[in-house]
Image: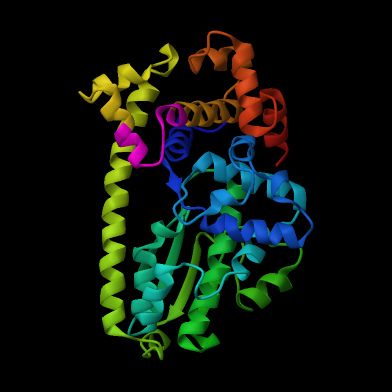
Amino acid sequence: MQTENHQLALSDVAQRSKVPPHLLRYLLQELEQRGIAAEKVLPHTVLDQYSDPTAFLSHDARLTYQQSRLIILKALALTGDESLGLAVGHRQSITSLGLVSLGVMASATGREALELGIRYHRLTGSMLEIDLEPSSGNALTMIARSRFHEPVLLTFFVQELFAAMVGVVRFTTGSKQAINRIEMMQTPPEKKSLFQDALDPSVIFEASRNAIEFDADHLQRPLATADRFVLHEVETLLAGMMQEESTRLDFLKSVEEETRRRLKNNPSIEEIAGVFSMSERSFRRKLSASQVSFRDILSQIRQSQAMELLLWSRLSSEQIAAELGYSDPRVFRRAFKQWTGETPSQFRKSATQL
């Protein structure tokens, strides 16, 4: 079992994250090429809502951490491929990040492009914390840190990020020499050559961090696609999107916290609206502006809390049902089967095997 801090950290991320499905688009493309249909990995809640299972991947869609988590874990289980994240990252091009990509290409230098990409990476649905720090000599190091505590997912996300990042840096700088070395915390894979070809021959495994060290001189070279007027327009749009996203998340975070605090008592929408001194109608309208309903929030909190308790505690299904505010354990089991396609006991057993 994990420590209490790990449990809290996972709960925090699992219940608050609402991210664009950027990465999942490329994951589904990779699975399709391997003969695995989207229906095999998408949650039942998505399949029930959309006739076309890929329709939920629109640019304005938002997924919870748990929805993304389930899709990726199922993909890893179905493929049995320890380098799946690498393949997904390799699928992406310089244009894959949409407006952020345009800002990268319009930047004056490789370094400014890198800084812009890191500054706005949350808008692309990134599941990692990314920082750029100076290192010894004439170098800059990008460090990717975990927002959760599941090694198998961290490995996947780091592989995806690094493969995509290497492609972008090589395109913008026009040189393979812009990267000094790559460090990865994962154990050495069976097929090291895949990583050496896709990333860099000098990639180091079982490192103390996940990092890419760049040669600062190469990053200072001007980009052929630089355009300061376009860059200004793009940065204005991105800054506005970041502010809008921050405001939206602050409100949703507060709603989730108040709902989670009352979870065992099965809180109603009237009760939570009253906490914010709002009428039920105004409360519904404000949630709708964020493309979410109170039923969605309550369901997502229960789903993530159920998964956390199944993963990290020894509570029985009946005890977990009570923690989530269900008076009948059978209702909880049906809901969990709808969320994941598995019963609570099946989920607990399969999760321990990953």
Q: Is residue 124 left or right of residue 290?
A: right
> Quadrant of the image for the C terminus?
top right
| Any part of residue 226 in sight | yes
Q: Residue 243, percent across and down?
A: 26, 54
Farthest residue in the left direction?
Answer: 277
Q: Residue 212, percent across and down?
A: 49, 71
Rendered view: 157 above or below 328:
below
In this view of the protein, which residue sits in the foreground, 25 or 12? 25
The residue at the point 60 percent across, 55 percent down is 155
Rendered view: 333 above or below 244:
above
Q: Is residue 204 left or right of residue 354?
A: left
Q: Would residue 52 be counted in the magenta stretch?
A: no
> Quadrant of the image for the N terminus?
top right
Q: Specify the segment rendered in magenta.
A: 285-297
Q: How is the image coloured?
A: rainbow
Q: Is residue 288 left or right of residue 229?
A: right
